[in-house]
Every structure is written in C-alpha cells, then in structure tokens.
Image (spheres, rainbow, N blue to C red):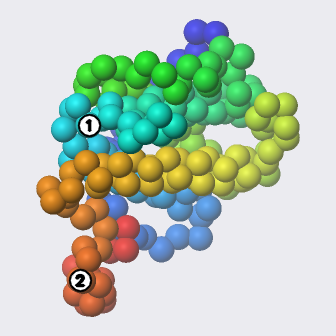
C-alpha cells in the first residue's frame, strides 16, 4: 500500500521517565508506551548479538522475532490510524514470525520504525478523539479501546523480551526495575524524590 508513518516525533525517546501526575488518558498512555519502549531497549541491550536470534525451543520466539512482530503490528495498527482499518491489507502477520533481520542494527531500525508509527499517530490526538470510532479487522473500536488493546499487547511482548534477555544475560543481568532485595531502599528514594515509579 506504500504507507509511511513519517519521521519519528521530535521528542526524545530517552526523555526522563519520571511519573508525572495527569488526568489525561492520552498523556498517561503515551507515558506508558514510552516506558515499555525503554524497558524493551534496556533488555535488548544486555544480550549478545547471537542471543537475539536464539529461541528456547521449537515453539518459542526469539527476541528478534518478537521485535519483528511488534514492529509489524505497529505499522499496521498506527498507520493512518483514524482513517483506515488497523489490519492493513498488505500486512503479512504470519511472516512476522519468521526470518527476522539478521543484524542488531537492522532489527533496531525496524523497532524504531514501529514506535515512530505509534507515537506519530498518538501524539497529535486529544482526549476529545477518544470516543471516535476506528476498526480493526472490520470490528468497531473506540480510540480508547484501541489504545488499551495495544498497551496490553505491547506490554505482553516486551515482558517476553525481558524474560528472554534475563535468561540469556544470567549473571550479567542488570535489573530494569527494582533490584531484588532492595525494595525498601527504592521506596525511600521515591519518597525523597530521588527516584520515580516509572
């Protein structure tokens, strides 16, 4: 279909992830999406190149395959988000689970392109858009439902990436959340403003 999501938004993806109080659903959703993006990247950075392409068994997906699937889903769901069905006619979902790019650089370019689709579609919206209707596979969704669906979907797959990366990194693993046996310390840091829950 020759669709393009455009350039990544100007806002840096590496911006501070501190929790900010908001009553805007879209603002909070964007914050969550960025948090999961950062979490996935923190996990991917801790594995060796060959581990990106290693599956634990014949039924499992490698990190590279999961990234390819996430990026394919994002391109399909978020390109022309308000005006076209979220399951694009040219999407090959089954193909997303085979033959991922064979280099870290190509894989991360695919990852970034997917996130650019998502953020480029979501950032211009206002809370007034939440009740608008879009379709996915011909089924009607409110924008709010569609966003919730994708938060759940991407967090599910980022969790898989983290699990695999932690398995492969083993004793090299650096915690991406509250380190084991350091909850009390983390609580003190949040209370003092030195850390955030995001």
Q: Circle 2 sits in a helix, a strand or a loop, which is it?
A: loop
46 or 33, which lies in front? 46
Where does the image place residue 93, in percent across and percent down from the top left? 62, 25
Numbered circles on residues, count = 2
Above or below, 65 against 133 in this view is: above
**Observer-nearest of 100 and 130:** 100
* Mark 2 neighbour density, 10 Å: few (under 14) some (14–19) many (20 or more): few
Going by the image, does 194 lie left or right of 33?
A: left
* Most foreground residue, 131 or 78: 78
Q: CA distance from mark 2 to mark 1?
A: 28 Å
Q: Residue at x 63, y 33 (%)?
A: 77
**Residue 155 x %, y %:** 51, 53
The mark that comes first in sequence, 2 or 1, is 1
Tell me if mark 1 has few (under 14), some (14-19) or many (20+) residues whose alpha carbon lies within 10 angstroms of its own: some
Give the image quarter of residue 99. top left
Q: Residue at x 28, y 43 (%)?
A: 44
63 left or right of 149 in image: left
Whether residue 192 appears in this view of the structure is no
Q: Quadrant location of the C terminus? A: bottom left
Q: Which residue is mark 1?
A: 51
The residue that label 2 is drawn on is 182
Q: What is the number of the mark on residue 192?
A: none
Could you tell whether 161 is left or right of 168 in the image?
A: right
Front: mark 2 or 1: 1
Whole-percent x and y of residue 180?
26, 77
**Residue at 35% across, 49% down:** 164
Measured from the top left, where is residue 65 in percent x and y? 44, 31
**Farthest left residue?**
172
């Amino acid at each position: 279909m020759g669709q393009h999501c455009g350039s990544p938004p100007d806002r840096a993806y590496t911006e501070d992830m501190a929790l900010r109080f908001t009553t805007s659903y879209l603002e909070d959703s964007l914050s969550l999406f960025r948090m999961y993006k950062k979490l996935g990247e923190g996990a991917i950075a801790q594995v060796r190149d060959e581990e990106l392409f290693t599956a634990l068994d014949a039924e499992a997906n490698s990190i590279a395959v999961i990234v390819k699937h996430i990026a394919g889903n994002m391109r399909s769901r978020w390109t022309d988000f308000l005006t076209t069905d979220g399951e694009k006619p040219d999407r090959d979902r089954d193909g997303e689970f085979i033959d991922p790019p064979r280099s870290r650089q190509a894989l991360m370019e695919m990852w970034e392109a997917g996130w650019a689709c998502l953020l480029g579609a979501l950032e211009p919206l206002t809370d007034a858009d939440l009740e608008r209707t879009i379709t996915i596979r011909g089924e009607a969704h409110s924008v709010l439902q569609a966003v919730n669906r994708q938060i759940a979907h991407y967090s599910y797959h980022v969790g898989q990436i983290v699990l695999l990366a932690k398995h492969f990194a083993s004793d090299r693993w650096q915690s991406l959340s509250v380190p084991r046996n350091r909850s009390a310390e983390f609580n003190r840091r949040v209370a003092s403003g030195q850390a955030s829950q995001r």
